[in-house]
Each structure stands twice: as structure tokens, then as C-alpha cells.
Amino acid sequence: MERPGDRPHRRFNPLTGEWVLVSAQRTDRPWRGQEDHLPRAKVPEHDPGCYLCPGSVRAGGVRNPDYQGTFVFTNDFPALVPADDQPEQGGRDRLFEWRPAQGTCRVICYSPRHDLTLPELMLPEIEAVIQTWIDEITDLGKRYTWVQIFENKGEQMGASNPHPHGQIWASDFLPTEIGKEDKAQRNYYEEYHSALLDHYLEAERSDGSRVVCDNDTWAVLVPFWAVWPFETLILPKERLPRMTEMGTQQIAGLADILKTTLTKYDRLFEVSFPYSMGWHGAPFTDHGTEPWTLHAHVYPPLLRSATVRKFMVGYEMLAEAQRDLTPETAAEQLRALPASYE
Ligand code: H2U
Ligand code: ZN
């Protein structure tokens, strides 16, 4: 493989078919924002004003149970709602095309504790979150083509509440990003008779320069084509097309790798790290699952410190995604960080 040098170059994302401009020479190595320690705001273990806490009354008047582990409810402000009796046909006009969209949205509380984040939970508690993801995909996958599990964490990513929680949006259509990944992985499989991301992980493991951490069952890397400064991809070491097919070893391993990865992020700028994270696995269509590899994308916005973030504006909006810090440098920095809070 020809390695890109320090001069500006573009890298291809085989999962989406998109390019990213890498301009490594534009900034010096980013400094660690050690001057910028933001004191962690004191968050109480239970906040009676929090709509996700056990026993709280949510918008719309429903009271949360006194839950002990994870807790899932239907979003009171859903972006998608189930089909009614009279489905619409949509419009086929060339310039005014539209389709009906059906689905459901749920919120998942990771813990009754208002003050903890995912990596601060204990391993069995993180396993319970993973098991809840599996249960939800199993249930919703019977009715919907796509089940998107995701988490927006931190105010910078638009999360409305520090209570540890994620979301699930299920739909009767393949959303745009999934459509791209589905097409790319199926095309690759047709050509090489192996899953794109399985081949990719093999290559990354033998190279090593973009690997952040791994354990027996999972590996985390800054993808070659990463757009966000510290973007990572979480990949299974064994063949695994969908979350619902995980074994107990893989669940335990995933809890461990999530804790490690998200703790490293918290240590990078000594701040509870904001991100959007979500899972992509084989959709519930008639096609086989062989081309697909389950993976998580973690997209954190921070660039240089707790307060200096990467903006996707200007050139990115109008022309193409661009980054200054190379994925290799980002991986090196994340790799060097401790996986604990001490
Ligand atoms: P975010 O912080 O990631 O936006 O998630 C909070 C979700 O919780 C959001 O989608 C829902 C919002 O619609 N919500 C309820 O379902 N009930 C409430 O009482 C408040 C917020
Ligand atoms: Zn709460």
C-alpha cells in the first residue's frame, strides 16, 4: 500500500463512496488542552427535575417507574410514528418526489443514576445496556427495515439532558447513510466474496498505525478516511453481521472496549467527552447479511481542547469534508491515553 505523505491529499471512504481532504501540514500537532480544565459541573445522583430519572413525570404526563437497571420508553416527541390504516402513496413527480415514512422512536436510559456516563458505569451495567440494545433490535427488527441505535452526548452534540441515555429510531425505510453503506458492502461482497469491513480490519490490524485499542473480541481504530478529528470505528474481530447475533463473549468484550474507548476520550481533553455514537448492522431486508459487518461509528466534535471544536462549515458544506490532524496522529494520541480515570 502506498502511504500518503504530509502533502494535502484526499482519502476515499469505501463505506460511503465519499472523499475527505486531508491537509496535514495546516496545523502543528494539536496541543493537549491541559490549561483548559473545565471543572466537572456537580451533577446530583438523582434530579427530581430530570424527566429521565426514576419516578419523574415526563412531558405528556406519564410517570417513569422506579427502574433499577436500564429503562426504555416511547419518545414523547417522536420523529417517526407507526403506519395508520390509510397509507399514503407518495409523489413520483421528478422534481417533487416524496415517500411516506413510518416508524417509531424510543428513548433508552442506561442507568437510574443521573450523574454517571456510559464509561463510568460498571462492566455488568454496560453489558445490560448492550443487552437492551439487542432486545430492542430483536423486537423492532420484526416490524421495521432499519433500527438505528444512537447516543448524542453533551450539550455540544445537542443532548438535552446529562442523564445517561440514548435513542432508538426504527423505520420502514433505509435511511440515506445506511443506503450508502448497504450498497457499498454488497458491491464489495459481490466482487471479493468477503465482507468489506472484515477485510478492512484485517488490513488495519496488520498495519497498526490507526488502531487505538483492542481486546479478544473487538478492535477500535481511527478509520483511514475519518472526517471528525478523533472519529473512531468499533469493529468485531469475529464475523458478526448484526448485533442480535452476538454471543456472551462478544457482549462482555464490547462492554470492556466501550469502557476503555470512552474513558480514553474523557482523558483526551480532561472533559466528559461529547460525541454522537451509533450502531450499523445488517438491515432487515430480503438480502443476505453476509456483506455486512456490525460496527459503531463514534463522531466526537472536539479538535484541540474541551472548548475548541471542529466545525463542518464553509468548504465542508460547500465542497468536501476536510481535516487537518491526520487519522494516524489522532490514533497515536488516543492510544497513548490511560483507560482509567486515575
Ligand atoms: P436527546 O437528549 O438525545 O435529545 O434525547 C432526549 C429525548 O427525550 C428527545 O428525543 C425525548 C426527546 O424527544 N423526551 C421525551 O420523550 N419525554 C420527555 O419528557 C422529554 C424528552
Ligand atoms: Zn436524571
Image (cartoon, helix red, strand yellow):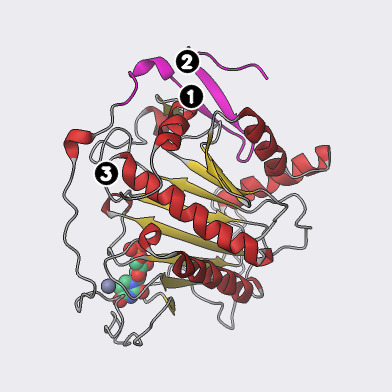
Can residue 137 be seen in this snapshot? yes
Q: CA distance from mark 2 to mark 3?
A: 31 Å
- Residue located farthest toward the front when viewing the structure as drawn: 342
Does residue 184 appear in this view? Answer: no
Q: Give 88 or 222, whichever is nearer the viewer.
A: 222
What residue lies at 59% left-to-right and 80% top-to-bottom? 86
Which three-letter amino acid code belongs to the residue tagged 2? Pro
Q: Along the horizontal axis of the image, is 103 left or right of 41?
A: right
User: Badge 3 local density, few (<14 within 10 Å), some, or many (20+)?
Assistant: many
- Please tell me whether mark 2 or mark 3 is closer to you in this view: 3
Report the magenta residues as a range: 1-30
Q: In the image, which disc is placed on residue 8?
A: 2
Residue at the image position 55 percent from the left and 28 percent from the top: 209
Residue found 59% across the figure and 69% down from its top = 134
Please state which of the two labelled residues, at mark 3 or mark 1, is closer to the viewer: 3
User: Which residue lies under the disc numbered 1?
Assistant: 21
SS type, badge 1: strand
